[in-house]
Image (spheres, helix red, strand yellow):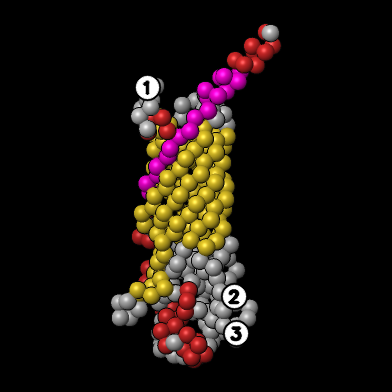
Amino acid sequence: MKYCLSLLLLFSNYCNAQEWQAEFLAGFSGYNGDLTQKRINIEEYRPALNLNIKYHTGNFVDLRGGIVYGRVGADDKNNSEPGLKARNLNFKTNILEANIIAEINFLDPEVYTAYPYFFGGIGVFHFNPFTTDDNGKKVFLQPLSTEGEGLPEYLNRKKYSLTQICIPVGLGWQMPLNDMWKISFEFGYRFLFTDYLDDVSTTYPDLNLLSNEKGPEAAALSYRGTPTTTSVAGHQRGNPSKNDSYFIGGVKFTTSLDNLLGRGGD
């Protein structure tokens, strides 16, 4: 009887320590890839939002699922290297990501009120790179096959998917804000399996061929450099040896679902 009572008390304490939480992050998003010369380029950062539902166990590992929205982009005009400026490419894309992530707390949350944490998981994201043509019109780039992707003459360049897998990893620091809310400062990096987040990866295709297959606009947006020419086939356009990536950072607010739904006093 004493043994059963002890197990019941332990189970009761364990259940009480568990808590469903809601999280909201407001911050910034950025990207590293073929159009970024510097790892950190604040003028290219754009707003980002993140909503999570987290299962807080009260122990060292918490689980969360979330939705992330951000926008990333870059422009060769912001690069200092003359060759990149002359390339004259640019892009933007909205990113919508869904993920499942495990948070590993470096200190026991039952003992410490403020502590650092690491997180890692898996996600799926959707993107669709676009630019503005010389007439000021917004143009989505993937259908144009700007590097010959999907054309029969370039069998080794497959059409890239606009929905892909990502691996989110990052660090954060959490502390209490008041009796109901906690605040965190978080930065997360996304490792990708594509080099076409920016629609730039390898070498220029034959522009005459591209114009015949996809239209003059495809050729015009594939090569936007100076001097004007059509003989750039095989010349370097991007760097295929390294995939693109994006990152999300900001300030995150956390509260229990009971508090959020007005049931904190029940």
Residue identified by numbered label 3: 152
Residue occupying the point 32% across, 76% down: 137
Q: Secondary structure at mark 2?
A: loop
Measured Cα–Cα span from mark 2 to mark 3: 10 Å
Q: Looking at the picture, does residue 262 appear above or below residue 89?
A: above
Question: Quarter of the image holding residue 151?
Answer: bottom right
Q: Residue 24 in magenta?
A: yes
Please give the residue where the numbered disc 1 appears in the rendered image.
265
Residue 239 appears in the rendering: no
Q: Would you say residue 193 is visible in this rendering?
A: yes
Q: Position of residue 34 (x, y in %)?
A: 49, 69
Q: Local crowd at mark 1 within 10 Å, few (<14), some, or many (≥20)? A: few
Q: What residue sits right under mark 2 in the picture? A: 158
- Which mark is first along the chain, 1 or 3? 3
Dot in front, 3 or 1: 1
* Observer-nearest of 122 and 260: 260
Residue type, numbered disc 1: Gly
CA gap, disc 3 to disc 1?
66 Å
Q: Residue furthest top?
A: 2
